[in-house]
Amino acid sequence: MADAAAVVFRKARLEDLRAILELLNDGKVGNVLERIEDPMPRLYTDAFALLDSDPNQLLLVGEIGGRVVASLQLTFIPGIAHQGTWRAQVEAVRVARELRGQGIGEAMMRHVIALAKERGCALLQLTTNKARDDAQRFYRRLGFTASHEGMKLRLS
Amino acid sequence: MADAAAVVFRKARLEDLRAILELLNDGKVGNVLERIEDPMPRLYTDAFALLDSDPNQLLLVGEIGGRVVASLQLTFIPGIAHQGTWRAQVEAVRVARELRGQGIGEAMMRHVIALAKERGCALLQLTTNKARDDAQRFYRRLGFTASHEGMKLRLS
């Protein structure tokens, strides 16, 4: 059993991309599969460069003994509303399948909550597919409220 | 009756800030009131400058005959997931109270859909308070699906 306390969270590096893509494919709910190819498709290295250079984006990984076992994307969003409140938003939360239920996701989210507070964000937000009861329970345990409808419109 | 076709949508300018704050206060659902003061509080001009200078942020206003009657914030979010998909996200949608129900909100959202497609976004997303049935119906008419729970955690 993995020890969630042993997970180190840090900003993703280019060499983590393959592991991140594997995590993304592992957690798919009937969605676009990632292209895990050698060489790495340019679309991913381009996207990585964008995230890496934007101070309002953080591609985060959790590693145990040098192995990437979890990842998510955190976006810091400035705003006018609510007296200039910043929001932090989480997307694409993943934990390696065989390590789930051991507190790694919770440790990662607690890390994100701390980061968002450090940045002065008043709110942390995310959307989670309604089909995933387990994910909703997970976020409720962390203190999230399902106060909003998460509405999506596909454009392509 | 206002003619929604007469609304011009454009990027907000500093001198629109007061009108935007008035729109934000007008639509409040038991939330933080904006400080409409003269001189304009620094927190708003700072927030405006951040949005104005970030190519992934668009503070949008709709005006009729030089009067700002609607506003929203659009954020373009790059990502690794779904083969490097970009998302567009809408926050803080407001239409002047006395002009609601006349198609201005719909015109603004259709403008946003076109902008998001131009930028190559595969998805447009937003969250709307579950207490606001009218807003949910509005977004469903535009083609949005309430597929997700919109989860929020207050940090301050």
Image (spheres, coloured by chain):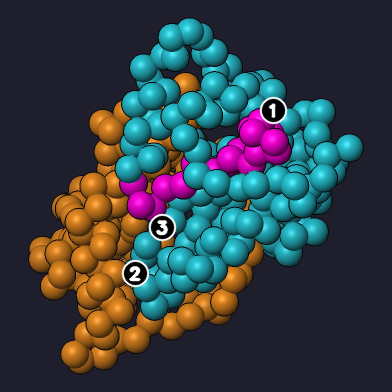
Chain colours: A orange, B cyan
User: Callout 1: helix, strand or loop?
Assistant: loop
Asked whether disc 3 touches disc 1, contact meaning CB atoms under 8 Å apart, the reply is: no
Q: Is residue B90 visible?
A: yes
Q: Tell me the amino acid under the disc marked 3.
A: Ile
Under circle 2, the secondary element is: loop
Q: Which mark is residue A122?
A: none
- Which quadrant would the N terminus of chain A be assigned to in this image? bottom left
Q: Which residues are magenta?
A: B54-72
Going 74% across and 60% down the picture, which residue do you hit?
B142
Q: How many marks?
A: 3
Residue drawn at (20%, 56%), measured in percent from left and top? A53
Residue A97 in view: no
Residue A106: x, y in percent?
A: 36, 48
Nearer to me, A61 or B71: B71
Mark 3–mark 1 Cα distance, whole angstroms, equals 26 Å
Chain assignment, label 3: B
Picture residue at 76% right of the left edge, 38% below the top: B132
Are the residues flagged by discs 2 and 3 from a single subunit?
yes
Instruction: Name the quadrant containing residue A99.
Output: bottom left
Q: Which residue is mark 2?
A: B80
CA separation, marks 2 and 1?
Answer: 35 Å
Which chain does tag 2 point to? B
Q: Which mark is residue B77?
A: 3
Q: Image check: A22 left or right of A127? A: left
Residue A137 shown left or right of residue A86 in the figure: right
Q: Amino acid at mark 2?
A: Ile
